[in-house]
Amino acid sequence: MHRRVLLRGLVGAGAFWQVGDALAQTTARASGPAARPAVPPRVIAIDAGHGGKDPGAIGVRGTHEKELTIAVAKDLARRLQTNGRYRVILTRNDDSFVTLGDRVKIARERRAELFISLHADSVQNPQTRGFSVYTLSETASDDLAGALATSQNAVDRLAGIDLTKHSRQVRNILVDLMHRDTANASNRMAQSLLDSFAPPFSPIQRPHRQANFAVLRAPDIPSILVEMGFISNAEDERALQQRSTQTRISERLVLAVDGFFAARRV
């Protein structure tokens, strides 16, 4: 009875050939070793910063950060999925508002193995330009890192959530929970990214920095935040508006992801 139900379920689900495959596998086991199973695709969460009612930074020429991040995120997702080695999750795929906590939640629920958050920020000094990459730290590595983290983390107040109310307690708990392996892996991904970027991209001084960004707080997912440039700088803003620049950023990120996972193979 159990055997009939199983076969009926397989056929009813349109899986008739699975029965044949099972018989073939049985024969193969009897005659020799089975073929090595295909490696499942790596799951990557790509987070396009801001969106919806939150435009993010606004450039000197009026560019909205949210438009740049979604453009690069979609292009990067397409490139990563081309060869079948990766499956990509976008925390947003349109001009919608997603809280910082939900961005991390999406990645964790979909069992992401890597989290990449894309940004193009603004600072008071219009001369500041260049790309950089951030990993999580309870203490900001410098004043610029601290200012950017404060700016990004304030986004959830638009949804009526004040992350600063219990920030010290939450920060301490999350830092305690984050496994050393996750922190080390995040740093390796940051270095892989820096190794992959080349002219015409110019990094800021000390391009790998640390700060307490809310979207980097998943304790079990290696996470980085990429500042593609500063749209408070006219040259960076002009470059980031160009499709060719966005394409080159995506290509470099693919190289960085490939390098990161190649180093993690057992």
Image: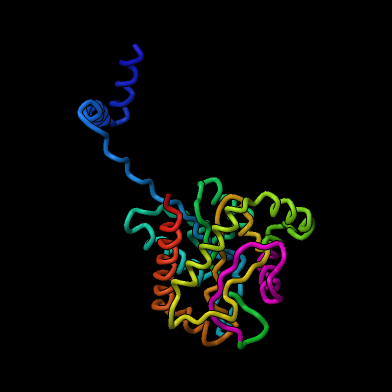
Q: Nearer the viewer, residue 235 or 139?
A: 139
Residue at left 34%, top 20%?
Answer: 6
State the extent of the magenta-drawn residues as a range: 128-155
Say which of 197 and 21 sits in front: 197
In the image: residue 14, left or right of residue 218: left
Question: Which residue is at a point 51% across and 46% down the rendered structure image?
Answer: 111
Does any portion of residue 75 appear in the rendered image?
no
Q: Residue at x 64, y 56 (%)?
A: 217
Residue 56 screen position, x and y as percent? 61, 71
Which residue in the rendered view is the most extreme toward the top?
A: 1
Relative depth, front residue between 164 and 40: 40
116 or 161: nearer the eye?
116
Tell whether position 147 is magenta: yes
Can residue 201 be seen in the rendering of this structure? yes
Q: Quadrant of residue 148?
A: bottom right
Answer above or below: position of 191 versus 182.
Answer: below
Hey, which quadrant is residue 214 in on the image?
Answer: bottom right
Answer left or right for 176 relative to 74. Answer: right
Q: How is the image coloured?
A: rainbow
Say which quadrant the N terminus sits in: top left
Q: Position of residue 224 (x, y in %)?
A: 56, 63
* Left or right relative to 123: residue 246: left
Q: Position of residue 65 (x, y in %)?
A: 56, 73
Give the answer, above or below, for where 133 lies relative to 112: below
Percent position of residue 118, x then y: 53, 67
| Count of numbered circles in the view | 0
Q: Is residue 216 magenta?
A: no
Residue positioned 53% across, 79% down in the render = 203
